[in-house]
Every structure is written in C-alpha cells, then in structure tokens.
Image (spheres, rainbow, N blue to C red):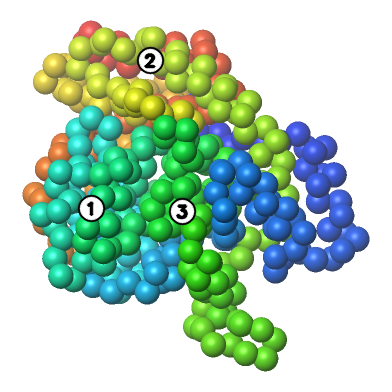
Amino acid sequence: MGQINVTRSSMPHMDDYISEIRELWDTHWLTNMGTKHRQLQEELKKYLDVPNVGLFVNGHLSLELSLQALELSGEVITTPFTFASTTHAIVRNKLEPVFCDINPVDFTMDVEKIEALITDRTTAIMPVHVYGNVCDVERIEQIAKSYGIKVIYDAAHTFGVKYKGVSTAAFGDVSCFSFHATKVFHTIEGGAACYRDLEIGRRLSKLRNFGIRDEECVDGIGANAKMNEFCAAMGICNLRIIDEEIAKRKMVADRYRENLDHIEGIQLSPLQQNVEPNYAYFPVIIHENVFGATRNDVAMALEKEGIKARKYFYPLTNTFDCFHGKFDVSQTPVALHISKRVLTLPLYANLALDDVDKICEVVLCVKKK
Ligand SMILES: *Cc1c(COP(=O)(O)O)cnc(C)c1O
C-alpha cells in the first residue's frame, strides 16, 4: 500500500475545466466579478437553496468580513474546538472570543452552556458545524432571539448538509463556507457567505472590494477578498460532480463505520437525526482507558504504515501560543478532553475500500498490544 493522506482534493475532468476557462482567453476578464464568478454564485444559490450568496477569495475572509458587516462590538460566544480561522476571525476584528464548551456526543457547541456566558457586552454567537455535524440550530436561534444577538455560523464543514430538509446555509444571520481544496466542495481556494438581509449583502460586497461604492466614491475601508474567474470555473466544474463525490464519500464512511462501530474504547461521530450528511470527515475518539492505547499511539502506528491521520482539532484554539495563556482552558473541559483523544482518519471520494479495511486493521492492531 502506498502513502495515504488524510485527504485528497477532488478534481473535475480536466477537459471540463479547460473548456470552462477557454472563454477567459477571449474576454481577458480574470477577476472582479466576471461571468464565471456570477455563474457560480447563481448555481450555488440553487444548490444551497438560499436567496443570497457572496463569493470570497477564501473561507476565512468570508468569516472575518461577515463579522465586520454585522458591525459587532464586545464579546462573541464561540467554540475552541475548531480550526484557527474561526477564533482568529473574531480576534482580528478586535472582538473578544468567549469560549463555550462542546457537547461530548456530536462535538458542537453545548447549547445548555451558552446562556450562562451571555453578558451585556455579548453581541453574537459564532458556532461551528464541526465535521459536518449540525449544531442545535433551533435552540441557538431561540437564544439569539431572546437576547437580541446575532448568529454567524462557521459552516465550512457542512457544504450540502441539510437539517430537516433545510440547507445549513440558511441558518443564522450569516452562514460562511470554505471552498478550500481540502473541503468536500472546493474552488481551489474560496469561500462564501450566505445571508438574507440585503443590507448585509451590500456591506459584504463593499468589504470584499476595498469599500468601493462606485468609480468615484470609496466610502468604506474594505479589504480585497474577491473570488477570481479561475477559481469560480473550478467551482462550476466541481458542482457538476458534487453529488457523485458525496456518494463516494458515503461508501468510505459506511465502511469505516462497519469496521469500527462497537469497538470498545472507540467513539464515532453520530449519525444525526433529521440530517442529510456530506461525509466530510471521519473522526474517531480513542478512550485510552478502555481501548488500551492512546490516540497518539494510534496516530504513530498509522504513520509507520504510511497513513496520515490528523489530530483535528488539537490543540484547542483557546490554548494557542499566540494568545499567551489569555484564555482559561479549564472553562471548556469537554473540548479539552475530546481534543486530546480525537483523530480524523483518511477520507476522500476515491479512497479504496480495501485501504479503509487496512487502516482499520492498523487501528485495531494497536488495541490488541
Ligand atoms: C477550512 C476552515 C475554515 C477556513 O477556510 P479557508 O477557506 O481555508 O480560509 C474556517 N473554519 C473551519 C472550521 C474550517 O475547517
């Protein structure tokens, strides 16, 4: 068996991509909301079943600029069990992240612990649909409404995921996606913000284009975060194959589940009720006291066989060196516990089922020792 990485970017047919970008040699229009950008935007509105989609150069800037568009101040309640981007988007906006613990079942924000964290400085909640697990969107909406605060979902992991038939892109004031090469759907680098309020849309459009209102008026201090035509063309091609890709991922995820379900000491991410999943990741939690070996033992055994699993998400963002111990990690004990035991196994559309079996064998071998 050759090397197996934790992920592998999906690629459209090369001919399809070439025919999609050919027209750019006629138009010479390479960025600044050209035809590919606008086409992808329209197609994503349909696919994600939302009224408005803004396209960005990456997922991070969709988060960072969405926080700005909502004109927040003070504190934002969020989760430390996420990628650096979520927390950095808050801090880079000079907002204070207040870390809420996660629940030990699906690893999303523990909604029972949100209200205790709300102060008169709280202006928003930024939860993450981690691994494609949908947050308790109903409870979060209730809380946000009763306290008059905003909700921005980091939906980087839930492209195409539906809850009770509703697209996860439709929840919150804004839902942000990442279309990074490693995600279920990608545009090489890219991102999107989905929203209902058209005023937020206008602010987002300006924030991603230097605050330019029109040729002779710049009335905002915006960044540059536009998706270019080559990336949009990649998205158009990848959207044509997304349903196949998710179906292939399902086969891989199902095979893992067959092999690892009911193994003592291994906890799997649940199949959530009322959710149409996208099989973005396959995290396992290794409970060493029952399993007889630690997460790090398992990761090393896999590494020896040329299999790259990832400690995703470890470390927690509230323990990052850049914050110099500013946050008290004892406030999020469940997240800390899970982050020390989690390992995401390789998962991508064309991962062979034999390889999945081999990976599981290696994992189970560690247990026997
Ligand atoms: C990938 C990711 C991001 C950032 O997306 P980029 O497109 O890489 O900027 C943000 N949040 C989460 C949870 C992610 O996984």
Residue type highlighted by circle 2: Arg
- The alpha-carbon separation of the residues under discs 2 and 3 comes to 29 Å
> Which quadrant of the figure has residue 93?
bottom left
- Tag 1 residue: 143
- Tag 2 residue: 257
- Kindly identify the residue that appears in the image at 20 percent across and 42 percent down: 110
In-image side of 330 versus 38 (left or right) = left
Q: Could you say which is closer to the camera, residue 265 or residue 268?
A: 268
Tell me if the residue at label 1 has its CB under 8 Å from ligand 1: no
For marks 1 and 3 on the same chain, the one whose residue lies earlier in the sequence: 1
- Tag 3 residue: 176
- Kindly identify the residue that appears in the image at 87 percent across and 55 percent down: 23
At which x and y percent is residue 91? 30, 67
Look at the image and tell me whether residue 312 can be seen: yes
For marks 1 and 2 on the same chain, the one whose residue lies earlier in the sequence: 1
Tell me if the residue at label 3 has its CB under 8 Å from ligand 1: yes
At which x and y percent is residue 330? 8, 49
> Which quadrant of the figure has residue 168?
top left
| Mark 1 element type | helix
In-image side of 219 versus 125 (left or right) = right
| Mark 3 element type | strand
Residue 357 vs 63, above or below: the answer is above
Tell me if the residue at label 2 has its CB under 8 Å from ligand 1: no
The local crowd at label 1, few if under 14, some if 14 to 19, many if 20 or more residues have their Cα within 10 Å, is some
Q: Residue furthest right?
A: 26
- Kindly identify the residue that appears in the image at 34 percent across and 47 percent down: 128
At which x and y percent is residue 190? 57, 54
Residue 41 vs 109, above or below: the answer is below
Residue type highlighted by circle 1: Ile
- The alpha-carbon separation of the residues under discs 1 and 3 comes to 20 Å
Residue type highlighted by circle 3: Cys
Q: Are marks 2 and 3 in contact (CB under 8 Å)?
A: no
